[in-house]
Structures are given as structure tokens and as C-alpha cells.
């Protein structure tokens, strides 16, 4: 059996267990509602088991686990995360304290299960108090919380969850960081499947992230930034792509990527940090509204990075022209600026301002962002921003993705690629790839198979024209098409399907109707003036 096959079996087993544990609360249908409880507990199980492994390593050197406990308590830098949990017997697993409440410093005994939510909250907050990196990550959950006087998760169900989590060991010798990381990502994806409209706020389909990471092709030591990082999936995919490339090259001792992200939702920010740590990666994840208050700054400008990857919320309407005018970071240049009532191209401008002199970026957008306003006689602000990016020769290309990949919509998406150092053959041109048919049916969502991921990334990276798949298109042709950069307009897949998504056509019709109403109103005013 190939090692890869063994790993896949291990992944499947771990994924089944991790999902079964999640479902032990109230079944698969309701499991996503409890992600804020489940994710920290599985994360804590990993911390406990790794801490046990570190204690065992030290015990071999000093003679016993009892001595190891004392030594680590005296010098907490001997371990990555110090856990203030000490079982009654030093030879017992550290997780047993979470499971039974029997700690050397405070023996809860049988009464532990009678106040499990309260005790569990106390333990996790104690762990956070000892580890600055975990502050706000595992201690933000109140397992004893109530709504209208009723516990959000009662002690019996909580105990059941802990028992299921206790079934597998997650230590260094039991499961590799990449396997548990993939399984944790699997759990986040499963939560996204049942997360309704909120799912897209924290999760980008893993295969979309893989396409972006492969095309970004980061090098050791590079800086990578995601201004809307959600659960940090896109950042993690970039590091995994680098590790895969290094492994294939046979090189050793290369520098990891320096990962940076910002997330506005506190629970998702915590999820991102847990996801990074459980993947055995380190990064700097800030919390806050990136659009209005970006945290990564250098003086009166944004901090810049080698690579930027992002999937901002599509078609946001909460930002007004005042938000753009109030910007003091030079993010919205003259000629671009306010894109109208939808913020997609506002985010693209933030991403562009976050690139260093040789930077590259990949941004997921709604397909409408590629075409809105094109074909209209009147000025459209979003189209004018697109025009600016095309005329400045900043767009390397666009990939059109299949429909029904994302968890909060059935609509297709595009990936827009920016490049400040286009090669000579690329200058003055855009590479447009239509991957609308590159999907397999899943439940409940479509997905990109592994061969499709590779084909998309390799074709785009090589700028290889393939009939009914990809084209190199000049800026002049883009201009003639009124700065519509949707690959579906330039590359026919040859299928019977409509080559332009229905939503694009509807939005264009709505725009034309609005303009027609405006023209009618102007004409009436002129006629009234003539009558007078």
C-alpha cells in the first residue's frame, strides 16, 4: 500500500470520528449550531495530548512524569503551551482532568458532572491565562451560558461530547499535524454545509483555495496576507502548497511563510487562530473591520506583502462614498476610488494597496463584479474602476469558476489575479480561463476534483491557450467589450448552457431599466421647460 493511501485511510477514520463527535450533541442537522463549543474542545484535546507527549519526552531525561510536571511548572518555556492541569496521578493523561475534573490542585470528584459547564469554562480560561497566544481563543466560550434561563448546551450533552472526543488520542505520535489539520478543516467545512447564509463568512471551499495557492506559488520566507481571513483557510493553503513544493524538490530547512490575516467576527477570529495552531503553523491574526480599520500598517500607509489572497463578502452595500473619502491610507487612487454601492472593487483596491513592489494577489469575487455596467451608455462607477485596473495593466487574468461551489450561494464566482510584475509576454494582455464545466457533483455542493485543480492552475500559470477553455485577450479587445472581463464572454465552453450567467443578465437589465427611467425623467423636464 502506498503511504498516501494509508494517510487517506487515516484521514477518513479521523474525519469520521471528528464528525461523529460533533453529531453526538444533537445529530448532524444541529451540529453546526454548536461549532463554537465543539471546535475549542477538539482543539483542547490536541493541546492536552501534545502536552502529554512533551512531558513524556522530558520524563525520559529526568526519570519520571512527576519530575517532568515539576520541571515544566518551574520553566514553562520547555513546552509550546503550558497547561495548568495536573491529574491526581502524574501518569494519568492530562485530558483526564477535562474529562473527570480530578485535578491535583482541586478534586471535583462526582460533583464535577453536576456543574460541568461551569468547571469546563474555568479550566479553559486557566489554560488561556497561562498562554498569551490562546487569549480570546479558547476562553471566550461560556459552556455554562443560558438563553432565557435555559442552558445553551446542557451538562449531559456536554458530557456526551467529551466522552466521544476522548475516544481518540491526538498526540504527536498518533496523528501528524497535516492530517489533524485536514480533519479539522473537514469539520469546519461540514459546519459550513449546514451554516446557511453565514457559512461564506468563514469558509472558502478548500479546492478554490488550492487553485489560488498553486497560482500564487509562494517562495520560502515570503509574506502572505488575507484581509478577510475567515477561518484562515486561504493562508493555510498557501503554506501547504509551499510545503508540497519543497517536499517535491528534496530541499530541507527552508523558511516557512509569514502569515498575516484580519477577521472582523470574534468567533471566526478565534476559529482562525485554532485552525492555524492545529495545523502546526504560526501567523499573526488580528481582529477588526479591515475596510474601515485595517490593522496592518506601516506609518500612514498599509503594510505591504509579497502575496495577498482574499475572499471578501460579495456585493457588500454597507460602505458609502464617505468611507472611501475618509480613507487616509491612500488605498483608493484617483481614477478608481468609489465603485458605487457594491464594495467588490473597493476590496480589490485594498488588496492592491497591500501589495509590495513585486506583489501578486488572488481575490474571489461574484461574477457580477466582472461585468456590471458594461454595455451601458451611461457612466457606471464600478466599470470605471475596472477600466482603471485594465488600463494600468494590473490584472494578470481571471478564472471563471463553476456554479454551486460556495456555501452561501449557488452563484458562480471569479478569481481575479493582480500582478505588479507581469512578464513581457503578459504585458498589455489578460489571461481568461473558463472553468465553468470543471466540477463534480457533491452533496450538497459541487466541488473541483483534483485533476481539475491541477489543470486550472497549470494552464493559468503557463498562460496556455486551450480551445473552449482559455484565451489570451488584449487590453484593446477588453476595451471594445466595454471593460467586461468575465471569461464567459470571451471563452465558449462549447456546451449547451448559457455562457453568461442569468444573474449577470438580470443585473444588466436592471441597470438598463434604471438608466431608461433616468433618461425619461430628463426628457420630461426638458419638455416641461419648452412648454413653459
Image: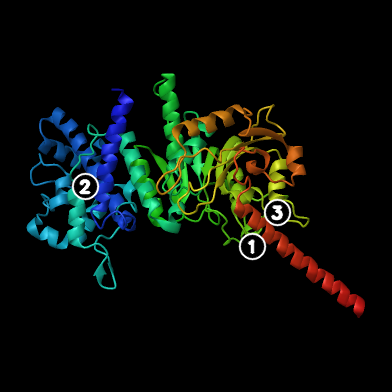
Callout 3 environment at 10 Å: few (<14), some (14 to 19), or many (20+)? many
Residue identifier under label 3: 373
Q: Which residue corresponds to the image point at 74% horizontal and 44% vertical from the top-left?
A: 481
Mark 3 residue element? loop
Residue identifier under label 1: 322
Viewport quadrant of the C terminus:
bottom right
Choose the circle earlier in sequence order: 1 or 3: 1
Viewport quadrant of the N terminus:
top left
Mark 1 residue element? helix
Q: Nearer the viewer, residue 374 or 154?
A: 374
Q: Nearer the viewer, mark 1 or mark 2?
A: 2
Asked if the residue at tag 2 contacts the one at tag 1, i.e. Cβ–Cβ closer than 8 Å, the answer is: no
Q: Is residue 127 above or below residue 427?
A: below
Residue 243 point in image, percent of width and height: 41, 29
Callout 1 environment at 10 Å: few (<14), some (14 to 19), or many (20+)? few
Choose the circle earlier in sequence order: 3 or 2: 2
Residue 413 point in image, percent of width and height: 55, 47
Residue 468 point in image, percent of width and height: 62, 34
Q: Residue furthest top?
A: 250
Q: Nearer the viewer, mark 3 or mark 2?
A: 3
State left or right for residue 441 relative to residue 156: right
Residue 281 point in image, percent of width and height: 37, 37
Give the distance between the C-alpha atoms of the residues marked 1 and 3, in whole angstroms. 22 Å
Q: Quadrant of residue 7?
A: top left
Q: Quadrant of residue 173?
A: top left
Amino acid at each position: 500500500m502506498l503511504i498516501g493511501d494509508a494517510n487517506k485511510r487515516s484521514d477518513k477514520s479521523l474525519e469520521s470520528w471528528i464528525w461523529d463527535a460533533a453529531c453526538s450533541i444533537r445529530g448532524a442537522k444541529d451540529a453546526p449550531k454548536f461549532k463554537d463549543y465543539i471546535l475549542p474542545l477538539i482543539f483542547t484535546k490536541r493541546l492536552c495530548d501534545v502536552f502529554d507527549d512533551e512531558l513524556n519526552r522530558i520524563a525520559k531525561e529526568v526519570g519520571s512524569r512527576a519530575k517532568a510536571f515539576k520541571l515544566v511548572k518551574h520553566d514553562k518555556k520547555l513546552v509550546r503551551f503550558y497547561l495548568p492541569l495536573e491529574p491526581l496521578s502524574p501518569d494519568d493523561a492530562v485530558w483526564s482532568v477535562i474529562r473527570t475534573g480530578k485535578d491535583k490542585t482541586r478534586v471535583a470528584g462526582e460533583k464535577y458532572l453536576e456543574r460541568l459547564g461551569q468547571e469546563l469554562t474555568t479550566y479553559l480560561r486557566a489554560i488561556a491565562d497561562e498562554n498569551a497566544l490562546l487569549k480570546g481563543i479558547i476562553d471566550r466560550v461560556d459552556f455554562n451560558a443560558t438563553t432565557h434561563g435555559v442552558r445553551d448546551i446542557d451538562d449531559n450533552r456536554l458530557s456526551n461530547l467529551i466522552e466521544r472526543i476522548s475516544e481518540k488520542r491526538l498526540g504527536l505520535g498518533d496523528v501528524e499535524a497535516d492530517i489533524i489539520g485536514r480533519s479539522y478543516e473537514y469539520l469546519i467545512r461540514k459546519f459550513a454545509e449546514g451554516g446557511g447564509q453565514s457559512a461564506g463568512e468563514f469558509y472558502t471551499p478548500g479546492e478554490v483555495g488550492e487553485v489560488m495557492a498553486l497560482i500564487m506559488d509562494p517562495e520560502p520566507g515570503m509574506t502572505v496576507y488575507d484581509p478577510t481571513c475567515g477561518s484562515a483557510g486561504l493562508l493555510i493553503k498557501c503554506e501547504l502548497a509551499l510545503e508540497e513544493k519543497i517536499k517535491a524538490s528534496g530541499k530541507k530547512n527552508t523558511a516557512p511563510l509569514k502569515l498575516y490575516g484580519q477577521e472582523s467576527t470574534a468567533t471566526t477570529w478565534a476559529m482562525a487562530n485554532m485552525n492555524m495552531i492545529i495545523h502546526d503553523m504560526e501567523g499573526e491574526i488580528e481582529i477588526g473591520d479591515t475596510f474601515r480599520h485595517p490593522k496592518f500598517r506601516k506609518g500612514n500607509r498599509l503594510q505591504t506583502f509579497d502575496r495577498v489572497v482574499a475572499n471578501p463578502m460579495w456585493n457588500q452595500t454597507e460602505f458609502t462614498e464617505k468611507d472611501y473619502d475618509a480613507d487616509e491610507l491612500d488605498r483608493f487612487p484617483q481614477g478608481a476610488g468609489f465603485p458605487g454601492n457594491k464594495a467588490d472593487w473597493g476590496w480589490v483596491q485594498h488588496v492592491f494597496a497591500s501589495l509590495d513592489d513585486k506583489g501578486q494577489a488572488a481575490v474571489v469575487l461574484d461574477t457580477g463584479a466582472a461585468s456590471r455596467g458594461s454595455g451601458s451608455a451611461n457612466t457606471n462607477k464600478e466599470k470605471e474602476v475596472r477600466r482603471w485596473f485594465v488600463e494600468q495593466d494590473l490584472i494578470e487574468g481571471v478564472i471563471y469558476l463553476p456554479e454551486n461551489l460556495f456555501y452561501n450561494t449557488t452563484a458562480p464566482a471569479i478569481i481575479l489575479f493582480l500582478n505588479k510584475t507581469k512578464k513581457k509576454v503578459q504585458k498589455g494582455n489578460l489571461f481568461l480561463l473558463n472553468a465553468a464545466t470543471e466540477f463534480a457533483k457533491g452533496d450538497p455542493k459541487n466541488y473541483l476534483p483534483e485533476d481539475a485543480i491541477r489543470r486550472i492552475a497549470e494552464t493559468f500559470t503557463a498562460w496556455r491557450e486551450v480551445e473552449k477553455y482559455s484565451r489570451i485577450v488584449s487590453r484593446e479587445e477588453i476595451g471594445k467589450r466595454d471593460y467586461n472581463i468575465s471569461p464567459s464572454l470571451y471563452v465558449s465552453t462549447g456546451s449547451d448552457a448559457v455562457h453568461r450567467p442569468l444573474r449577470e443578465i438580470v443585473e444588466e437589465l436592471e441597470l438598463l431599466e434604471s438608466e431608461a427611467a433616468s433618461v425619461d425623467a430628463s426628457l420630461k423636464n426638458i419638455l416641461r421647460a419648452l412648454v413653459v
